[in-house]
Image (cartoon, grey):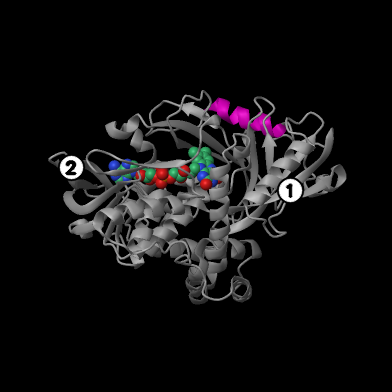
Amino acid sequence: MKRDFAALNDEFDLLVCGGGIYGAWTAYDAVLRGLKVALVEKGDWASATSSASSKLIHGGLRYLETYDFKLVRKALRERRRLLRIAPHRVWPLRFGVPVYKNSRNGTLKLKAGLMLYDALAGGPDEQMRHAHFSSAAFFEHFPFLNQHGLKGGFTYGDAQTDDTRLVLELVAGTLALGAVCVNYAELTEWCEEGGHVCGAKIRDGETGAVLQMHARQYVSTSGQWASQVSTTSGLCRMSKGVHLVLPALHMSEALLLTAPQDGRVFFCIPWYGRTLLGTTDTHFIGDINHVEVEDEEVDYLLKAANHYLKAAWQKQDVIHAYAGLRVLQQSADVHPSAVTRDWVLHTATNRVHHSIGGKITSAREDACEIVNTVCAHLGVTNACETKIQNFPWTPQESYATWCATISSRARELGVDAESIQWLMRRHGANTVHVLQLVELDAQGAARVLSDVPFIQADLQYCAQQEMVVHLADLLRRRLPLMILSRVDAINLQKIAQAVAPVLGWDSARVRTELAAPMK
Ligand SMILES: Cc1cc2nc3c(=O)[nH]c(=O)nc-3n(C[C@H](O)[C@H](O)[C@H](O)COP(=O)(O)OP(=O)(O)OC[C@H]3O[C@@H](n4cnc5c(N)ncnc54)[C@H](O)[C@@H]3O)c2cc1C
């Protein structure tokens, strides 16, 4: 993946502004249909909401409470599809739901909800179907939970992804098919003629250079920045969601729990050997460029989780915290949790198509609608291929066979089992290239930091191949080291120096990168 700002100086069929999940799917779908596509992102790929999610590919059990059956069915259909076409990128994850004597939802209501969830999923196989457990059996699954008042519980199937790498893989696939995709390239102005958009000014975040580019169609997938555009600001509202990264609970399944403070649903999710605890859902009206985690949000989540845990988490257990903004459709509902998570496409009077709201889970299907609209304007009749097309890094052979072959080779090379599992999920078919680096230098099999499952060869591969511009791109998004571990200054310097040669950084540049905020 090579960054080439000058390549934007061309005529395109489609310009997509915003490199989150919606921009990535839109560009990938369009290039697969034969369009000449440019995708610009003002920061790094997935640097906004698309890296701050709960990382679930799910129907959303809780949306059944708001009778959003259409949304749940659509998301479950996508879940099934993504599990099939991208087994390395989207994998099954079961959730436990305990039922206590004083639970807001009792056994009968949960049973009915889970039966409906399974039915909306089209009658899933046993791996995804819900199951009921007695108190003792449920406690065996989740021995760290309070047993007092536990009446039993359920487990049900959903799926998990790495949101940031999902975006990156789609951008890589789009580039490989001949599109121009540039990070640190900000669209600063839509140029108009007779009230219609006829071009866009793009600023190179690295050099400050500005160029004017032209396309036949324009799509804005700018997420929360839609709230700053006069034509779309009235259509959306925002809700903030916070996650905490905490030590492992030693579970292979996640938990869906209900906060005792307000009855809201939240999750404890296993993630790269840690636990993700989240999320909050609060109306947001602050500065969209600075979305910070507040103390009371940390307290809220810890209090909610500690209500269920035998050994309470303390504030000092929090390894990292991150916040993101959901863009929701404008509505009269007071609480953001009551607002639909569905997505809309709005074409402004200047003819820019704006994507508003949505979910990572259903972004592929929504992007298909965006590109259908674009194609209708261009008179192109090529059908959407993302429905059936494997992901760019999906291994060619059967996934189980591929996993067995790669795992065995990685073990021979001295890579530890946990790192192997994540390596395959992170790189899919490209895992062989990472292992080739280990073949060249056996040190590549060692972990970068002992407490997180990333090996040195993975770090080098990402730095070489994945359009890294700044250190934060590498250590927050290509490998989320800074999110999963407390990296001290000495280790940070060692890592920066280790990747400096492949990134072409001299010592002054290394110092600048180390001094910059890790955003
Ligand atoms: C806390 C939380 C948890 C969530 N959990 C889940 C989940 O588990 N599963 C799920 O399916 N969904 C989840 N979602 C929803 C999902 O994350 C979002 O729907 C999705 O990430 C939105 O993607 P996007 O591409 O629209 O926006 P973004 O990811 O925000 O991307 C927009 C991009 O546009 C860029 N941009 C803006 N202006 C410009 C410009 N002028 N020039 C160039 N680039 C520009 C920005 O830098 C940004 O990268 C969650 C959301 C939140 C907030």
- Using the image as rendered, state which of residue 21 and residue 144 is in the foreground: 21
- Using the image as rendered, state which of residue 396 and residue 197 is in the foreground: 197
Expressed as whole percent of the image width and height from the top left, the position of residue 82 reads 53, 59
Callout 1: 10 Å neighbours few (<14), some, many (20+)?
A: many
Which mark is drawn over residue 196? Answer: 2
Expressed as whole percent of the image width and height from the top left, the position of residue 46 reads 42, 49
399 relative to 312, above or below: below
The magenta stretch spans residue 446: no
Expressed as whole percent of the image width and height from the top left, the position of residue 172 reads 39, 62
Q: Magenta residues: mostly which secondary structure?
A: helix
Image quadrant of ligand 1 equals top left
Disc 1 is placed on an element classified as: strand
Boundaries of the magenta span: 294-306
- Identify the residue under disc 1: 155
307 relative to 503, above or below: above
Residue at x-position 55% and y-position 30%: 338
172 to the left or right of 198: right
Specify whether tag 2 is near ligand 1 (CB below 8 Å): no
Specify whether tag 1 is near ligand 1 (CB below 8 Å): no
